[in-house]
Image (cartoon, rainbow, N blue to C red):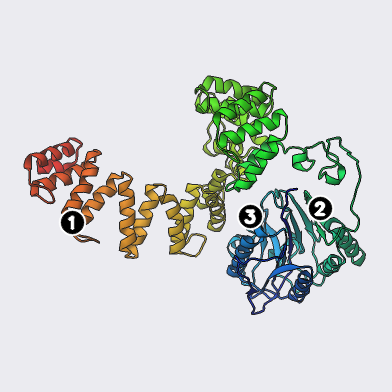
Amino acid sequence: MKKYVSIILMVLFTSLGFAQEYYRNWNVGKETKKERIALVIANNHYESNGSLVMPVPTAKKLEKALERQGFDVLVGHDLNRVQMVNILGDFSNKFKTYQFAMVFYLGHGFQIDGDNYLIPVDANPKNTADVEVHAINVEYVLKKINIDAIPKIVVLDACRNNPFTKNWDSFERSGNNDGFDDVNKLTNAEIFFTTQKDSKVRDDNPYVDFLIQEIQQGGCLDDIIRRVSKRLYDNNPDQVAAKYGQLLQRVCFGTDPSPVHNDMDSDGDGVLDNDDACIYEFGYKAYNGCPLRPTLEWKIMMEKYNTPAHVEKSEFEKLNSIDTPEATARLGYLYRRGWGVEENQEKAIQCFKTAAQQSNAFAQFNLGVCCERGLGVPQNINTAVDWYQKAAEQGDANAQNNLGMCYQFGKGVPENLGTAIFWIRKAAEQGDPTAQSNLAMFYDLGDGVKQNIDSAIFWYRKSAGQGNEDAQYYIGDFYCDDENELPVDYKTAVYWFRKSAGQGYSRGQFSLGIMYRYGYGVQMDFDTAVYWYSKVAEHGNSLAINHLINMYEESEDIINTLYWHRKAADQGDTWYQCKLGEIYFRGELVKQDYKSAVTWYRKAAEQGDASGQCSLGYMYENGYGVGKDKAIAKSWYQKACNQGYEPACNNL
């Protein structure tokens, strides 16, 4: 049986204080015979807000209990932001070699605008926009360990509210309302909150103590959590724990005292209830008895930025064991994208045709994509539109969006913005993030509809919330523009640019470089600005290269100035080819070298650049780096003059 690594992420939020110890670490590459690992972080004193009594003492008891259970334990007390990032990085590198893991966080935690945060001891946000800079986004923590094949249990023990309604309190774990939000979209995970949404929990609440005691008693986690919740309710009926999500297998401490053995199959899917994670839904053995995800949700999941290769491979193997039109269509999609299997357009087409013959809408959509792009079949936009139409009429959101774009740009059908918006809106209302961003753009530009910035922002937000990098960038851009209906808010702009940039979106990366270079919404930071500009410049973006050159020139960094000049020139940018020729001609930054100057002027001239042609003529006229030849000089001057370049005309 395939082994699964179990991660039990117990994120226990308490409101806190200050001690001087950092963390006890291990050699990340060190071999160990232990199969269990735990990370315990407890922040007990905050530098800018009230301290609590219980987090660190409770954590110390927890650490001893876990060690007795055979865990390797990594401990961090009163960590600032940098230290929290470091310890999470250490843990993310280590836990993959274990079969079972737990992570505890005891400290401040709250929710702002749909995002959840852990609060380091040096945090001092003055408003909601400061939080992204001062705190640790829970999404960042989960990304460190969120591999679909690895089970996770998240327990959040904190007030689920927004502390900016009042000062952080020493007795309660945050402020008053609008609090710690539900954590969504975790795969193969159970999420436990030790209190209901929009409610508070005291610093001395006994949840962790009960949990320690029940772990020591042994048993499987579901039973342990059930006993903890019962004891919690008996202790204080107003503190009611909440649970979300589904773990795909049993997680136990020691021997399961009451293993379930039966031959019941409540949903008739061939997976016995004892092994079925979705007992009352017809599913598949490959998915632990659960049904396939909805098509759009599955596609969005697979398209996540940096999805691990082994997750893609696992998904391919699971789908390959299921004989249904939908599974076949999804197999084709993986073949088409080369995810989890070597890219093979021929096999992709075979899968799509097989499923499409059974009227599978996702297969029909993909056949449309293949026909539009010429993937495995002759390129034919008219055939593509036919397939999009079939799938769109069955309600496939991807096809509805693509069909709308065909009408928008007149591809295979007459251009018709009204029909385009009709189909794109249908897809957007189903939750397709690309369609939502497209619909927002219509309202943003007033193209085909009356311009409505409120509607544009609404749809951009919908799309951005699902991780669409275009929409995230445009929301950030709205907050930088003083001519729209949103107030200028550079800190919020930085938040959205960072989201977009983190997915590799070049416009978000470039914008983040600008924010750090000039100190808009963040502290001015030369190195961070260079980092983000470089991300874009490495792909040949001339504007980013120009910013880098200006910054390095201002800092008198000769080596990097020359590096980026050459980078742009090597890419064929005639302006930088001429500039590099001038640098060698004048001996600026480098030793004077007429031959190198001629080389770069010639590259620009041969691409038709008038300035390069004139400069090359000058080199021939005076014999700099080449043999003096007035006839050749005149021919280059003439080429430049014919383009209206006055200095060349004056030299004739």
Residue 125 seen: no
Give the image location of residue 51, x and y in percent: 71, 76
Residue 42 seen: yes
- Binning the other alpha carbons within 10 Å of mark 1 as few (below 14), some (14 to 19) or many (20 upward) gives some
Return the residue at label 1: 593
Q: Secondary structure at mark 1?
A: loop
Q: Secondary structure at mark 3?
A: helix
Name which residue lies at 84% across and 36% down. Answer: 270
In the rendered image, the vertical position of residue 130 relative to residue 328, given as above or below: below
Give the image location of residue 110, x and y in percent: 70, 61
| Left/right of residue 516 with respect to residue 262 in the rendered view | left
Give the image location of residue 120, x and y in percent: 64, 69
Q: Residue furthest bottom?
A: 20
Q: CA distance from mark 3 to mark 2?
A: 23 Å
Return the residue at label 2: 250
Name which residue type carries label 3.
Lys
Name which residue type carries label 1.
Asp
| Left/right of residue 236 with respect to residue 526 in the rendered view | right
Q: Which mark lies nearer to you, 3 or 2?
A: 2
Q: Nearer the viewer, residue 487 or 274?
A: 274
Which callout, 2 or 1, points at the residue further toward the start of the chain? 2
Name which residue type carries label 2.
Arg
- Binning the other alpha carbons within 10 Å of mark 3 as few (below 14), some (14 to 19) or many (20 upward) gives few
Q: Nearer the viewer, residue 214 or 478?
A: 214
Which callout, 3 or 1, points at the residue further toward the start of the chain? 3
Q: Is disc 3 in contact with disc 1, using a CB cutoff of under 8 Å?
A: no
Q: Quadrant of residue 273?
A: top right
Q: Secondary structure at mark 2?
A: loop
Return the residue at label 3: 143
Q: Nearer the viewer, residue 460 or 315?
A: 315
Give the image location of residue 363, x and y in percent: 64, 27
